[in-house]
């Protein structure tokens, strides 16, 4: 009995070490709730209230005005940058998170998307995972360092930025690099883009993003002379567009590999069990049949191995009783680094096989190089991961989405996506209905990021 009680006590103690002290948990939750409940969508909200609220909190904790910057490309699109000074022995580390979110409609959700709701072991809310969890943790941990009088050997910079989701002229990272690079210039940056993978509640891997796809948006248009709806003809703008989209739905770009995906699938093959393990090893060995099987097994794996294009918006017609004069759609493509824009556009034209469907690129296309596999950084991430979750490996990944890391990498600041928040592999609700994160993962991620940044900022580390 005594031995059993000892084991029980040991288990509780080990679990408690994953969680921050109660006061720091409360602080992180307060910040999290505050910023989730500020509507900061690209078109219907603003990031400035988030920046101002966080700045006020930092000032109340004793951060001087001179170390806090609030500003941006437009009055509603402010960024916040705060600096915690170290000895200056090494160049700063930049901790990045964005405070804008994808739009969310109340009628689409089972709860108010702009109220932080704790239910059944999850935090729900727009931005709860993308990316206000990391934003809240960065600020809570920075305050904790100050309260503990931590003396790092480098400055620690936190930047909470605008319009990662919307991009364009209001993008906070691009604006800061152009107008105030000195505020965020760093030896390296830690950002979103990495995540912990779980499978049926079991932690499988802590993924570190070192490369990412880039985004290309295409607009498809079909123009027609139109006419009266009582006189239909086969030459209908909507039908042409519908045919093109139907063909797109059955098309897949070629499956490809690179050093990052080979490393990821090769290491994952040693973790997985059953027949899929052999298939993953086959992917690492460039087997096309294995790639096909693995791509079919998981949307995430499929997207890692190929460029993808999907219809995301559609419009057409001008009256109920008129033949359409215009039918249009937006195609969102997430492109592997080695695929050129021109290649993707030409491939789509062949798929559509309809000269009436015009294809043009929307917006400026921004591409960034991969970050080097920094051995010291990866070792430190692996050590901190193993301290908290023994036996969980760290895997380098190619992110299937895109982040502001591409701007930093293009500017010569190596950027790594790492969070320590664990999610079920195929339960990614970012940008979707009822976005959520496990409550325990939020707090465990707080501990992980606190330990990681401290380990990367200790004198002599």
Image (cartoon, helix red, strand yellow):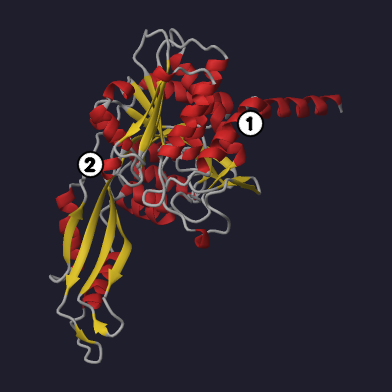
Distance between the Cα atoms at labels 1 and 2? 39 Å
Does residue 18 appear left or right of residue 226 in this picture? right
Nearer the observer, 111 or 457: 111
- In which quadrant will I find the C terminus? top left
Q: Residues within 10 Å of mark 1 (few under 14, many from 20)?
A: some
> Which numbered disc, 1 or 2, marks the residue that appears first in the sequence?
1
**Residue 25 picture location, percent across and down:** 62, 30
SS of the residue at dot 1?
helix
Q: Residue at x 25, y 28 (%)?
A: 179
**In this orientation, does residue 43 appear?**
yes
Q: Residue at x 23, y 30 (%)?
A: 178
- In which quadrant will I find the N terminus? top right
User: Which of the labelled discs sits on residue 26, or is there none?
Assistant: 1
Nearer the observer, 123 or 456: 123
Which is in the foreground here, disc 1 or disc 2? 1
Q: Residue at x 43, y 51 (%)?
A: 431
């Amino acid at each position: 009995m005594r031995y059993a009680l000892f084991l029980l006590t040991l288990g509780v103690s080990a679990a408690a070490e994953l969680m921050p002290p109660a006061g720091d948990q409360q602080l992180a939750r307060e910040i999290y709730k505050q910023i989730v409940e500020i509507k900061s969508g690209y078109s219907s909200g603003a990031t400035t209230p988030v920046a101002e609220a966080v700045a006020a909190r930092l000032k109340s904790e004793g951060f001087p005005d001179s170390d806090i910057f609030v500003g941006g490309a437009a009055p509603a699109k402010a960024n916040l940058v705060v600096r915690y000074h170290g000895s200056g022995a090494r160049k700063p580390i930049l901790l990045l998170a964005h405070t804008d979110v994808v739009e969310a409609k109340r009628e689409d959700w089972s709860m108010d998307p702009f109220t932080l709701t704790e239910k059944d072991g999850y935090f729900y809310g727009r931005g709860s995972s993308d990316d206000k969890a990391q934003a809240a943790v960065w600020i809570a941990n920075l305050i904790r360092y100050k309260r503990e009088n931590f003396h790092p050997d480098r400055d620690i910079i936190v930047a909470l930025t605008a319009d990662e989701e919307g991009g364009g002229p209001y993008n906070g990272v691009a604006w800061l690099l152009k107008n105030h690079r000195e505020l965020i210039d760093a030896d390296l940056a830690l950002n979103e883009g990495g995540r912990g993978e779980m499978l049926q509640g079991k932690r499988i891997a802590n993924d570190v993003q070192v490369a990412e796809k880039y985004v290309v948006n295409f607009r498809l248009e079909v123009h027609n002379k139109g006419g009266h709806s009582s006189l239909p003809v086969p030459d209908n703008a909507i039908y042409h567009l519908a045919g093109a989209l139907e063909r797109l739905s059955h098309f897949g770009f070629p499956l490809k590999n690179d050093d990052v995906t080979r490393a990821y699938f090769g290491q994952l093959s040693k973790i997985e069990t059953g027949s899929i393990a052999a298939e993953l090893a086959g992917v690492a060995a460039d087997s096309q049949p294995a790639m096909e099987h693995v791509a079919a097994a998981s949307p995430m794996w499929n997207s890692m191995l190929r460029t993808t294009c999907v219809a995301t918006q559609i419009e057409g017609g001008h009256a109920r009783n008129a033949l359409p004069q215009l039918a249009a759609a937006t195609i969102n493509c997430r492109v592997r680094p080695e695929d050129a824009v021109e290649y993707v556009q030409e491939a789509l034209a062949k798929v559509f096989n309809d000269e009436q469907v015009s294809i043009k690129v929307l917006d400026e296309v921004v591409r960034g190089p991969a970050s080097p596999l920094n051995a010291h950084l990866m070792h430190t991430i692996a050590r901190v991961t193993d301290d908290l979750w023994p036996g969980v490996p760290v895997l380098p990944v190619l992110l299937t989405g895109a982040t502001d890391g591409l701007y930093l990498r293009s500017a010569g600041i190596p950027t790594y996506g790492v969070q320590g928040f664990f999610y079920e592999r195929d339960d990614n609700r970012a940008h979707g209905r009822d976005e959520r994160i496990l409550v325990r993962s939020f707090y465990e991620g707080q501990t992980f990021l606190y330990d990681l940044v401290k380990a990367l900022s200790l004198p002599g580390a």
